[in-house]
Image (cartoon, rainbow, N blue to C red):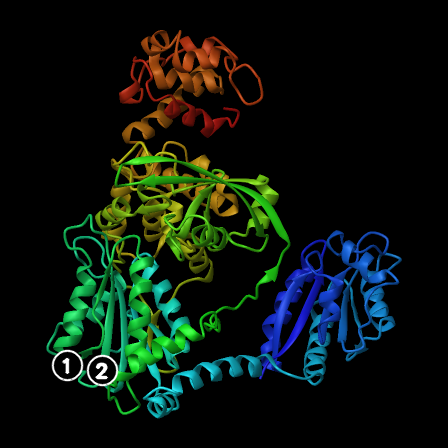
Amino acid sequence: MSKPVLILFGTQSGNSEDLASQLAKSAPSHGLDPKVVDMEAATVEQMAASERILIICSTWGEGDMPDAAEALWDSISEESAPRMENTHFSVCALGDTSYEFFCQSGIDWDTRLEELGAKRVFPRKDCDVDFDEPYAEWANGALPAISSVGGESVAEVVDESVEEVVEAISEGESSGEIDAIMSDGDRKLVILFGSQSGNSEDLAFRTKSKASSFGLNAEVHDMEGFDLGSLTDTSRLIIICSTWGEGDMPDSAEALWQIASSDKKPTLTQTHFSVCALGDTSYEFFCQSGKDWDGAIESMGGVRVYDRVDCDVDFDPPYEQWITPTLANLASVDGSGEYHSELVTLFIELVKGTSGKESVDDLDTPVISRPPIEISFKLFRYNPEIMENGWDTLECNMPGHFSILDALEKIKSDIDPTLSFRRNGPLSGVLVNGAVVRADRSRLIDLVRLCGNSLKIEPLPGYQIVKDLVVSTRNFDAHRAKSKPWMVPATRAAVNTVSGTTIGMMEISEATKLHVLGDVDSPQLLHSFSDTLSYDSEYMGPALVMHSWKRINDQRSSDKSIESKINLLQNEGGAWNETDSSVFSRQGDFGKMISNSFNECRSELIRKKGFSGKHGRLVKWYGLSVKWSGKVNETTLYRQVLGPLGLVSNLFSGVSMRMMLGFTRTGAKPFRSVFPLVAPPAGIGKIPPMINSKVESHHEVVNLFNKLDKRF
């Protein structure tokens, strides 16, 4: 049974906030139900009403409170501050011994709470800049100490409300039956997902969270590596599977599907199941993978308890309509595998009566309360029925700890129920004030600090818009299938482990490099980093370029596979179609890493292909121009791109005018010398589309300058 504890933090640099989150994760193991609150959002009345308080506060300057804690400290320091005889507390103080007033803020909190009558359950701990060990000592003592005091628990209150619902249902005809099935020892539910982009996986874990409300113990399994034979003893099964390409299984599901469609498939006569299929109606074989699994499980003897749902790219509404009756039907299967259809309605009513109490056991990080913020949202809207788009401007007051997703949910619930967006996973990304972010992971308070109180929210660029903020990944999926992203391994040396297993070996440095290249949270979001995709339908995009580059760097790949990937990136639609990889750097540290990797990839392509192709020839002739003219500047590059006739044709428009008028970032003159314009080999070996011609795509030329000089 959990007892509520209020965890207050006052921070200047973020250390106290991090420790408060750590403390909240440890609290449940001591029978505590934590609520983490920034001192900026807390009130004295809230403190006085709390039976248990743990405080983590830093000191800055000459013994001063953090800015966020100043208002709360002023309130509690007043003579009229409420008494706290019923409050138990302990304090962890952060500071720096190089300052005179070491940990003064924490000392002040410790003293003031005692003055107001609060009872200290564990001594204050004063931590220097190396605070990890002293904090751990304090947490290991304060948590059990504060858990041992006080009265009623949160669990007891929740149980009472649930019991009221159960009692209300028990007045009906089948009271004894639902009590019996809920107390049955076997309540296991297997949730099996096959995912290509991450959506099925996210829905699987969302389903697990919902299942606990039906008294089910859910287990989530990826189809990759799953033992199909283990389902012979399973009474309840949910399959969530996406389709990609022309009705194909996701890569991770292919091996399991081969078994399911072979003579070695198991018999599942004791298994009750339902299927959620994800797909895209713009494809011919819509939701084919889910349909295949639905038929396969039935052919193995499985009992379908609720009809399959086929979801389009906007899958949240149909999923929500399907999941409640599905879980209710599976919950009506008892421990011996017998299905009780008469209990389905009762389970649905039970969950309706306990709405808002869904399990959050799968969430690791507690919500840290932040004060409300006045925000002006400018939302992109698109109606596919009348093919019109526009903008909605909304003035809202929302808690700072809300994510973009929370804000969109609030707007949909309270203002406009027609608003459409992705709710979770890799495709929950949106464009906020020009930055690509995941809506479910970006807090309003962080975005406001960076962008101000006006947030412009648009769909991910580079994709076809389905409705409002929902996009279709059809083109991305098509390019991905064309790139053949799977591993084609080479035969290589191996070693035998102690257990007798044979495994391949790789140097730590090589493994780390591959891990960094592959550490992409969402390929679909990385795909949106490019400004080129909206204008070049042949371009595979940065996500697939980076995936192929990773395969090239993987020593496990066969020589044939590496050569194939190099040709893929070198040819039309590959790495050279990216107009300007420097734009990736706008997306933070991750974007800078991608930009650097992109340039490494291009350098390797030039080296491997012997300076072939238009970009390779540019590098070659530019090198000769520098050598023969003795000049290393933008002018040397400019004439190499255009040639003599091209210079004339662009004299009064386009890039020539831009350079002559000095449109640079620093205001410096672009033309620093006339000599490089006429010195040989001017007009020789130019990029084919630009030889002696007028430039139409100015951004291509600007990109070439950016490779050497970042002023443009």
- Tags 2 and 1 touching, CB below 8 Å: yes
Quadrant of res 489: bottom left
Looking at this view, is 457 or 255 the one in front? 457
Residue 65 point in image, percent of width and height:
80, 56
Closer to the chain start, of discs 2 and 1, is 2
What kind of element bears circle 1?
Answer: loop
User: Is residue 166 left or right of 147 when viewed as pictured?
Assistant: left
Looking at this view, is 406 or 285 the one in front? 406
| Label ID, residue 510 | none
- Name the residue that disc number 1 marks: 301
Q: Is residue 496 visible?
A: no
User: Is residue 573 left or right of 84 when viewed as pictured?
Assistant: left
Task: Identify the residue at horizontal 25%, vertical 43% (top origin).
Answer: 568
Calculate the distance from the C-alpha at mark 2 to the C-alpha at mark 1: 8 Å
What kind of element bears circle 2?
Answer: loop
Residue 2 point in image, percent of width and height:
59, 81
Looking at this view, is 434 or 249 the one in front? 434
Quadrant of res 274: bottom left
Amino acid on which disc 2 is placed: Thr
Residue 298 point in image, percent of width and height:
15, 76
- Name the residue that disc number 2 marks: 271
The correct choice, above or below, for 287 with respect to 573 in the image is below
Looking at this view, is 280 or 600 the one in front? 280
Task: Identify the residue at horizontal 73%, vertical 64% (top origin).
Answer: 130
Badge 2 density bin: few <14, some 14–19, many ≥20, Cα 10 Å:
many
The correct choice, above or below, for 321 with respect to 160 in the image is above
Amino acid on which disc 1 is placed: Gly
Q: Is residue 582 visible?
A: yes
Badge 1 density bin: few <14, some 14–19, many ≥20, Cα 10 Å:
some
